[in-house]
């Protein structure tokens, strides 16, 4: 079983957050699910569970930040992108406040709970807010780095879309990353998959399968969705001649949209396809089933690559 | 005060027992679904659907029917069981709960499931929708009632108190909120997660009539709802139903442990023994 990113998140929050006296952690009656409970157990005096009151939580975080603290707020991605959005925009990002908005159960990882609990529009909403850094980690190693960076280095508003699940590791322990710089996971010449989150390990599986068919794909982990690494998009298009984006998110407003914006502005026309939820409400089911149904698993990504390469 | 006949009371109790057993069997079999909150709302939903509310599969499109909103949408399994009993869909369909392609989504969707009056899941929205329905009824000249079932943790949401003011302002006296007051939410006991304080006093100060009942006694639930229906004094009414999260199975009671976790085989067998299904 691959480590679940939410568990890594909770542990990293303890590891880097507890020693830093400016870090405060807030939750809205989902601490046992988001795993912020681990911080709460380790450091109860800097942990604030406000009950089922997301709007209250996020504005309270703004107050903490305005007083020099580094608040991490925690609830499901779908609620950060909706109930918390007005404060994220007009209180936090507008003022450049140092609030870390952590959206758990992202993508389809809410599984059986169904559409109301899936987070497939969070990137779209948060990406539209000026000043907001938008990231989503793909593996445990990156999750750990991201928490460390948000605690120790990055100042300002940030949104992080966190999976409840895990799909395997693709990085060496201690790999370093840079905010805003995409990570090339695999080199290739025939096409590039630009992905984030659990679509990265799944795209790696797809790439390995495609290699056996003679299709050699590059895989780029676009863990910083905003600001997007334009250079990585441009070189991928120029060097491999076809782009497939893959995300457990609506094809509207996610990395697919962001990459399309870069390509169009640069006047680069290459075969291009967006793997993601095709502008539909999702449904209840096991996470594994939903990943297949909505085409965001290794098979769905591989098929999208075949179709796109065929158009070259 | 209106009361149930002895016979009817016994029938409803038997139905509640049956629904409890079936819910635990189903959620164990499927390994998903919210057990604690389904068991705590059982008598409230059964009494409302089977006795107090004017709702049938036949009048489901009638503009003057009563409405029941399960604002705590995670309690869907018990809601669906009641709807099946009322003939909105076959009882066998319960087996498709939370499965791919099912009309019975993890949280209720009014566009998919016959009998569901409002899509819920994100907490804190049902009472506002109830106000919309109550005001719509008044504009249409309907004397129908709107019932909204709220979780006690759900009362943490500020929107509940926005809606409480709205209901008073617009004198929605046919709006009846029922709080499934089980004193437990997701992360723990409500008193620890968010102390609600003087709950009756809060509602009263927002301009509501406040009644209280034993939420696991169908006679108490019935009489209290019937009393609420007759008040019609220009104020909305809230019923604080004292309940127990996980009611019916000792080790599921008064804990957040069975809020949403899958029931193990061992827990299932112990539960069935307590409910006297297995001996
Ligand atoms: C807006 C929103 N925030 C968080 C959740 C996650 N959630 C589902 S149930 C629940 C606890 C509900 O407690 P309560 O209202 O007391 O219900 P009950 O005890 O009857 O299950 C939480 C936090 C949600 N569904 N919606
Ligand atoms: Mg409760």
Image (spheres, rainbow, N blue to C red):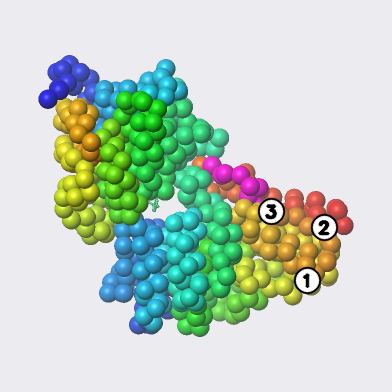
What is the x, y in percent for residue B125?
A: 38, 46
Is B274 covered by the magenta stretch? no
Q: CA distance from mark 3 to mark 2?
A: 13 Å
- Helix, strand or loop at mark 2: loop
User: What x and y, as percent, mark residue A179?
Assistant: 60, 77
| Image quarter in which the C terminus of chain B is found | top left
Q: Chain of mark 3?
A: A
For marks 1 and 3, give the CA distance: 19 Å
Residue B144: name its quadrant: top left
Read off the residue under disc 2: A271
Query: Is most of the magenta stretch helix, strand or loop?
Result: loop
The residue carrying mark 1 is A234
- Element at badge 1? helix
Q: What residue is disc 3 on?
A: A275
Q: Give the image location of residue A176, x and y in percent.
A: 59, 80
Give above or below for A157 relative to B261: below
Q: State whether discs 1 and 3 lie on one chain.
A: yes
- Residue occupying the point 45% across, 23% down: B61
Please state the extent of the stretch shown in magenta in the rendering. A276-283
Image coordinates of residue A143 in percent, x first then y, are 52, 70
Q: Secondary structure at mark 3?
A: strand
**Residue at 42% in and 42% down:** B120
**Above-or-below relation of B115 to A135:** above
- Res. A45 visible in picture: yes
Q: Nearer the viewer, residue B10 or B108?
A: B108
A279 is within the stretch colored magenta: yes
Which residue does the image show at 51% across and 51% down from the upper left? A118
């Amino acid at each position: 079983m691959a480590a679940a990113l939410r568990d890594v998140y909770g542990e990293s929050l303890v590891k880097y957050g507890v020693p830093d006296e400016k870090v405060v952690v807030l939750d809205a009656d989902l601490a046992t699910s988001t795993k912020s409970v681990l911080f709460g157990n380790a450091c109860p005096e800097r942990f604030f569970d406000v009950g089922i009151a997301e709007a209250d939580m996020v504005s309270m975080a703004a107050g903490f930040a305005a007083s020099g603290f580094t608040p991490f707020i925690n609830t499901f991605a779908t609620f950060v992108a909706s109930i918390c959005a007005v404060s994220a925009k007009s209180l936090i990002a507008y003022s450049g406040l140092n609030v870390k908005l952590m959206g758990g159960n992202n993508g389809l990882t809410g599984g059986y709970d169904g559409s109301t609990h899936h987070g497939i529009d969070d990137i779209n909403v948060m990406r539209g807010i000026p000043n907001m850094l938008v990231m989503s980690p793909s593996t445990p190693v990156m999750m750990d780095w991201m928490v460390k960076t948000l605690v120790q280095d990055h100042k300002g508003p940030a949104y992080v879309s966190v999976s409840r699940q895990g799909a395997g590791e693709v990085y060496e322990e201690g790999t370093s990353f840079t905010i805003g710089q995409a990570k090339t996971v695999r080199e290739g010449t025939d096409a590039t998959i630009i992905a984030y989150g659990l679509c990265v390990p799944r795209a790696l599986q797809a790439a390995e399968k495609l290699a056996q068919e003679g299709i050699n794909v590059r895989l780029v982990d676009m863990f910083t969705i905003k600001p997007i690494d334009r250079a990585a998009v441009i070189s991928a298009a120029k060097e491999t001649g076809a782009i497939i984006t893959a995300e457990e998110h609506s094809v509207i407003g996610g990395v697919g949209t962001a990459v399309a914006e870069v390509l169009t502005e640069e006047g680069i026309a290459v075969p291009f396809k967006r793997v993601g939820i095709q502008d539909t409400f999702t449904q209840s089911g096991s996470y594994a089933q939903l990943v297949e149904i909505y085409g965001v698993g290794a098979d769905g990504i591989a098929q999208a690559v075949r179709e796109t390469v065929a158009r070259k | 005060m209106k009361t149930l006949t002895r016979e009817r009371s016994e029938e409803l109790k038997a139905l509640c027992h049956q629904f409890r057993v079936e819910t635990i069997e189903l959620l164990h079999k499927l390994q998903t679904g919210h057990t604690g909150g389904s068991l705590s709302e059982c008598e409230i939903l059964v009494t409302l659907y089977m006795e107090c509310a004017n709702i049938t599969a036949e009048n489901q499109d009638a503009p003057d029917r009563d409405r029941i909103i399960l604002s705590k949408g995670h309690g869907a399994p018990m809601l669906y069981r009641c709807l099946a009993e009322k003939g909105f869909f076959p009882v066998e369909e319960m087996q498709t709960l939370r499965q791919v392609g099912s009309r019975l989504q993890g949280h209720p969707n009014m566009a998919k499931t016959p009998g569901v009056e409002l899509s819920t899941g994100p907490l804190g929205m049902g009472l506002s929708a109830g106000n919309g329905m109550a005001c719509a009824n008044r504009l249409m000249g309907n004397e129908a009632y709107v019932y909204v079932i709220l979780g006690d943790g759900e009362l943490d949401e500020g929107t509940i108190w926005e809606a409480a003011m709205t209901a008073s302002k617009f004198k929605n006296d046919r709006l009846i909120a029922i709080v499934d007051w089980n004193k437990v939410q997701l992360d723990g006991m409500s008193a620890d997660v968010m102390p609600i304080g003087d709950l009756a006093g809060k509602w009263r100060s927002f301009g509501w009539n406040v009644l209280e009942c034993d939420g696991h006694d169908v006679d108490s639930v019935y009489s209290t709802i019937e009393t609420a229906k007759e008040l019609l004094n220009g104020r909305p009414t809230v019923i604080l139903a004292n309940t127990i999260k996980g009611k019916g199975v000792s080790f599921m009671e008064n804990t957040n442990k069975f809020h949403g976790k899958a029931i193990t085989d061992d827990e299932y067998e112990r539960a069935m023994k307590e409910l006297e299904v297995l001996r």
